[in-house]
Each structure stands twice: as C-alpha cells, then as structure tokens.
Amino acid sequence: MKLASLKQGGRDGTLIVVSRDLRRGVKVPHIATTLQQAIEQWESARIALDEVYQALNKSGVPNSFVIDVSELASPLPRAFQFLDGSVYLHHMEKARKARGAEMPPNYKTDPLMYQGMSDRFIGPRDAMCIPDESLGLDYEAELAVVLDDVPMGLTANEASGHIKLLMLLNDFTLRTLTRTELPKGFGFMQAKPTSSFSPVAVTPDELGDAWDGEKLDLPIRSSINGEAMGHANTGKDMFFTYPTLIAHAARTRSLSAGTIIGAGAVSNLDASTGYACLAEKRADEELSTGKATTAWLRFGDSVRIEMLDAQGNTIFGAIDNKVARG
C-alpha cells in the first residue's frame, strides 16, 4: 500500500491512497483525514485503506485523480518525533576523521542517535531554503521507518512488528555548523534544518523479499543537478538494524505513533557504489590529496533521491529539492 498527503486541510495535510504506479490518488476521509490519524488507529485503518488501494490498482475508484507531485507534502508533514541514527559506521568514521573528531568509545555497542526537528518537513518537490551558502549545506540520502505506538523497554526482536511504513529521507545538514556545534556536547540544533521525505510512504509488504523485517536490500540512488552521486545498498554494511534502533530509542520511554526513525546516510564498503552525501566524498578527497575539492550545495542546485525495484520502477517516487535563499 502507498500513502501520501496533499498540501491542503491544514498543517497535517490530507491523506490520500496512491496507486502502485504513483499515477492516481484518492482521498479517504471516511477512513482517516490525515496519515497521523491513520497511524494512530492503524490496525483498523490499514484494512480499510488496503481495500481502497486494491480497487485503485485494479479498476479505479470514484473521485480518483491524477497525482501532481508538486501538490504533495511530506507523507507526514510534521511528526511528534523524528529520530535519526548513524548505523553505517564506514561513513561515520570517515566523516569524523575528516573534521578531526574522535569516534565515541561505545559506538559499536550503542547506536548513535539524535532527536531532530519535526514540527515541519518540506515536501518532496519543495525548495530547501537556507540563509547563506557559507553554512555548508549537504544532503544525506537515507531510508526511514514510521512506527505505531511502541512501549518502553521492548526488545529488538519485538520491534520489527511496530514498523508500519517506510519512506526515503533527505536529511539536510549544515556542515560548517557541525564543527562548532557538536563539540559543545549537546547535540545538533542549528546544523540540522528541516528534512525532506519521499512523495509516498509504503507498507513493508510492497517491498517483497527485499525487506526482511530489519533492513531493505535495495540501492538508494542520489544525484546533484542530474549527475549521479551514488547507489549504495541500504541493507548492506548496517552495523545496527532498524529494530535495534527502535529498541535503543525506547529503552527509557515509549514512542508515540507516527514517530519517524532514520538510519543515517547510506554508505557501503564497496567504493564503486559512490556516495549518499557530500561529506563522505569530501572526506575521501581530503584523505587522498589533503584537500576537499567538491563544493557544498549552492543556490540553484537540485538534489534527487530515488529507489527503484528490480524491474526498474520507482517505489517511493523521487525527492527532488532545489536549494534556494531563505
């Protein structure tokens, strides 16, 4: 099943069911008006939403319409909680080495995670606005999961069943600010502006055998201004899986339905898969030549992130954000 939110009906948007080929959608106010409402009553809403989805894919349903991606908000235009981890240690080790930072002593036993801004996300075709190019804007191509209500203290083995939806994520980062903000020891704030998510969120069953309940065995593709950056497989070289991240987050608190958890910029040990962020590319340049030559994102640049299935069809639709002056 594929779900999205129109930019109408208030800050939480209007929920629509989207056809598998992402061409048509239909509002479902008799089931739920927003995705947040649906995820809060998921067990009952899922059945009704899936009936609409199956009909939309077969013969269509009354009042369906052609999808205009520019009219879509993030599937969750805002969320009660957004947590992002860093499970591709290969990426983290290089990024920290390049900025002269040490790895935490327990980074192989406790996942790194921060709580990000979630009061608003930009849509998949919206401009990413920043006040100044000198802040070093970077993108991060990620995969994120959306949860239903998660009790405090659950185990990783119990956590997989709480993953109800998956989305692509562009976790924008202002790299210049990380150099001064992170050494304070109090986490990200100014260095993490708003994020962008894929046009649709999908249920795990849409991913077939590529999803094993813990990770997704498919490449995530990213490009800047049409130039390919990378196609690393999201399921490879993960030191911690999504259930492990969920259990880590829920160790001392419950997680409300609609909580989003990302796993960090995707990075494979195989260098031929390229990059999912500029920081890692620049780190390789610094480590090999002593100087980074790749520029951070500039006004007018466009970042595209997408994932294709084995037949070459887009699964989530593409994130395509242009950088603009705020």
Image (tube, helix red, strand yellow):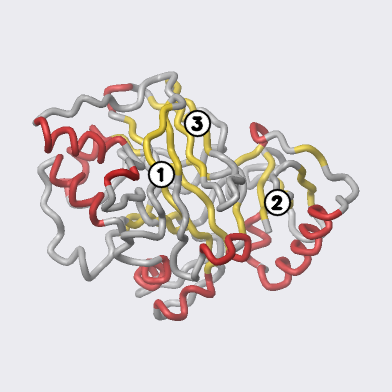
Residue drawn at (56%, 51%), measured in percent from left and top? 309
As drawn, 294 above or below 268 = above
Q: Quadrant of the C terminus?
A: top left
Q: Which residue is mark 3?
A: 321
Marks 3,2: beta carbons within 8 A: no
* N-terminal-most mark, 1 or 2: 2
* Residue sitting nearer the eye, 149 or 227: 227
Mark 2: few, some, or many residues within 10 Å (few <14, many ≥20)? many
Residue 56 horizontal side relative to residue 212, left or right: right
CB under 8 Å between discs 3 and 1: no
The amino acid beneath tag 3 is Asn
Is residue 8 rendered to the left or right of residue 143? right
Location of mark 2 (residue): 20
| Residue 173 percent location from the top left of the image | 34, 38
Other residues around mark 3 within 10 Å, as few (<14) / some (14–19) / many (≥20): many
Image spot of residue 206 (x, y percent): 63, 60
The residue positioned 21% from the left and 25% from the top of the image is 293
Residue denoted by label 1: 231
Q: Is residue 188 left or right of residue 46?
A: left
Rounded to the nearest angstrom, the CA distance separating label 3 from label 2 is 23 Å
Q: Quadrant of residue 65?
A: top right
The number of discs equals 3
Camera-nearest label, 3 or 2: 2
